[in-house]
Image (cartoon, helix red, strand yellow):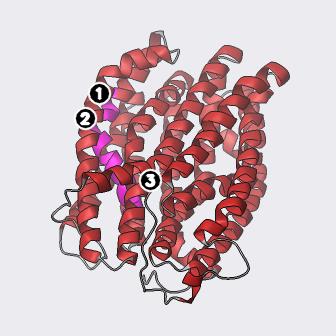
Amino acid sequence: MDMSRHLGRRALLRFTLPSIAMMILTSVYGVVDGLFVSNCAGTTAFAAVNLIMPFIMILSTLGFMMGSGGSALVARTRGEGDDELANRYFSMIIHATLAAGIVLAVVGAVLMRPVAEALGASGELLELCVRYGRISMVSLPAFMLQYAFQTFASTAGRPRLGLRVTIAAGLANVVLDLLLVGVLGLGVTGAAWATVVAELIGGLAPLVWFARPNDSLLRLGRPARDPAALGSVCANGSSEMMASIAVSVVSIVYNLQLLRLIGRDGVAAYGTVMYVSMVFTAVFEGFCMASAPLMSFQHGAANAVEKRSLMRASLVVVTVAGAGMLVVSQLLARPLALAFAGHDPALLALTERAFRIFSLSFLPMGVGLYGSSLFTALGNGLLSAALAAVRTLGLEVGAVLLLPPLFGPTGIWFSVVVAETAAALIVAALVRGLGPRYGLVGRRPPETDSRPPLVAAPAPALG
């Protein structure tokens, strides 16, 4: 993939489709996991997985940080014309991710029980949470690598690599779920081991591929020893890590409110909504993941014309996708709820209503997610992190705490709609206010517009 050429909306979609498909498949495999647990192991087991999952995701978010912040640095370095240094940065980031994953896996295994207790689990629910969580720590380092490689696959000009690995890992997860949970009846234990095998495939397969001779733009080799660059990667990628942590924190707050107001069925209904909505939001996540390196490359090449073109095309894509997802989700709300909760009429009604309300957030959601990705790609990780924090920890947590006293349990489901709408408005204001600094808005092209795409100019400092 020649990142220096102009990309219209169609070309942009062709480049990002493999990453979108990869994220959708990842989410679909997660949905299958939930389906087996819900229908074969029961509501308590399903609630246990959903209750402990946010903690597992918090531990894994460092992979998001290293992938997003690292791809911005590597793509920008390539845009400046230094491919050798870009490869050394890539190797340094992968080594650091693997080392951090091992440490976090040990910490997570030790803290699993006290964290589950703090989340409100007790009795059988507590034991199932601890069992699922500790088994999941076996593959945490590979899980973090998988997140990092998903982003780097696009930066390396090989987005289909991430798609192929995701298909292989997902199929392994589905087959093992069928065997361990569906046939052997191992419940959350079987589901956890199925996930471990899938994550080992997802993280270690690309590690081997990049370490061997290949024809991609990146290859693992001698890592750079540059603490300052690694620090800038962490700072710039902190927005994606913050967004992931915030989503998990929001899930924890949701679960606590649901346990208080509705009980175990509320947690199970929220789990179904989250599983299904992951498939829809994966479209936005995959698009942002693949399009960010394109923006970083043009930023490194100081090509304001292409930066404006990419941003406008991207906003059109996420807006149209959001409208389409809203329509589809309303049409499929009943069948999707039946798949998870058809065995319990009360849970079915609760789940369907929750999903119909929650899906209203798909319309503005893409703009908020793209805004955070945009500023990371432009090297302003602190602003991107602040935007992610405001969108989730500020707006959504605030809404989920304030709306239920006013509107009862229904207010919980409307919280994300309010938060995503406000976040989209904030992104619009930021692009309008800061756009001239980055060459994203303005009728008269800045001086850098006249430069050829491959002529590098000094890029602003990260953060």
Asked whether 138 falls inside the magenta stretch, the response is yes
Whether residues under marks 1 and 3 lie with C-beta atoms below 8 angstroms apart, the answer is no
Q: What residue range appears in magenta?
A: 134-152
Main secondary structure type of the part rendered in magenta: helix
In the picture as drawn, the residue positioned furthest to the right comes out as 407
On whether residue 58 falls in the magenta region, the answer is no
Indicate which disc, 1 or 3, sits on the residue closer to the N terminus: 1
Q: CA distance from mark 2 to mark 3?
A: 22 Å
Q: Which mark is residue 227?
A: none
Task: Report x, y in % for residue 317.
Answer: 67, 69
Helix, strand or loop at mark 2? helix
Q: Is residue 228 above or below residue 180?
A: below
The residue at which mark 2 appears reads as 103
- Which x, y percent locates residue 126? 44, 15
Query: How far apart are the two marked residues, 2 and 1, measured between alpha carbons?
Result: 6 Å
Q: Spot the residue most to the front.
A: 447
